[in-house]
Amino acid sequence: MNPSTLIGIIASALLLATVVLFTAQAPSSFFNLPGLAIVLTGTLAASFISYPLQEMQRLCRQVAVVFRREPQASELENDLDQLIDMSRHWSRGNIRAIEGALESTTNPFLRTGMQMVIANTREEEIREMLRWRMVRVKAKERAEAQILRTMAVYAPAFGMLGTLVGLINMLEVIQAGDLAVIGPRLAVALMSTFYGILLANLVFKPIAVKLERRTEARLMAMTLILEGVVMVSKRRLPSFIEEALNTYRAEHRDEMRDARRPQSADASVESA
């Protein structure tokens, strides 16, 4: 499982355990199936009414991917290494080697770009096509995150609906003065709001943020591949392409200073 998601789940479990075990005389008072059913069914019903079935199904798949693993930096490293190797073949005019490498490439974005290079497509057309692919990915994945943000708005609203239902039912029997009857209805009124706020801020919004961060990482990787493909189409030297990509993908590196201070600087500091 995704490490950060696992940590979040453990922290959420500790939070709920603290709330249930240390703030209530009876832990079972925090478990109210009618209130939870109102929030869950209402949120899902409103979401399915708001969005097409295909988008909801795609969202379920994306959430499963996010829970399984983080975007791997090694995947980008592998794609860029393949791009550099293909640039070497292109500089030698070995198109067959490039076609063979494309057959084993698992990145469709890289495959499309290099196929356009092989077809001698103009640089402007390559850039336009790949940027259009990036815009489409960005729009599709942000729409999926927006579904979760919409669900985060629906959940507290249906929590308030459950509160109103519980209060209405409680008012019907309040004249009887029977606490055994009033108590369960009051529990529905209060716990449905609790469930709505909990689901919105501990489930829907965090997953939406994680999907958005994953989209940003994918767009950054696609930008690196786009620039590499464009340099190949310009017939830049493979050594130049490799150096440029290594510069682009270097993280947290200050190119103006070495991480280790010179010995002379250390000595002057000590003498001072």
Image (cartoon, rainbow, N blue to C red):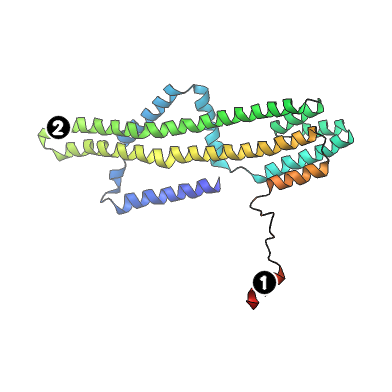
* Amino acid, disc 1: Asp
Give how far across and how far down residue 11 sits, in percent: 44, 50
Q: Which residue is mark 1?
A: 266
Q: What is the C-alpha distance between the residues marked 1 and 2?
A: 81 Å
Task: Point out the frontmost of discs 1 and 2.
Answer: 1
Q: Secondary structure at mark 2?
A: helix
Residue 146 is at least partly visible in this image:
yes
In the image, 139 versus 206, the foreground residue is: 139
Quarter containing the C terminus: bottom right
Q: Quadrant of residue 119?
A: top right
Q: Which residue is at a point 30% across and 48% down the rendered structure image?
A: 27
Q: Position of residue 244 (x, y in %)?
A: 75, 44
Residue 59 in sight: no
Rendered position, 7 above or below 87: below
Badge 1 or badge 2: first in the primary sequence: 2
Which quarter of the image is occupied by the N terminus? top right
Q: Is residue 270 left or right of residue 1?
A: right
Residue 199 percent coordinates (x, y): 39, 38
* Residue drawn at the location 20% of the way across and 39% of the way down: 183
In the depicted view, which residue is nearer to us: 124 or 250?
Answer: 124
Position of residue 153 relative to residue 3, above or below, is: above
Amino acid under disc 2? Val
Asked which quadrant contains residue 30, the reply is top left
Q: Is residue 42 left or right of residue 104?
A: left
Q: Which residue is mark 2?
A: 173
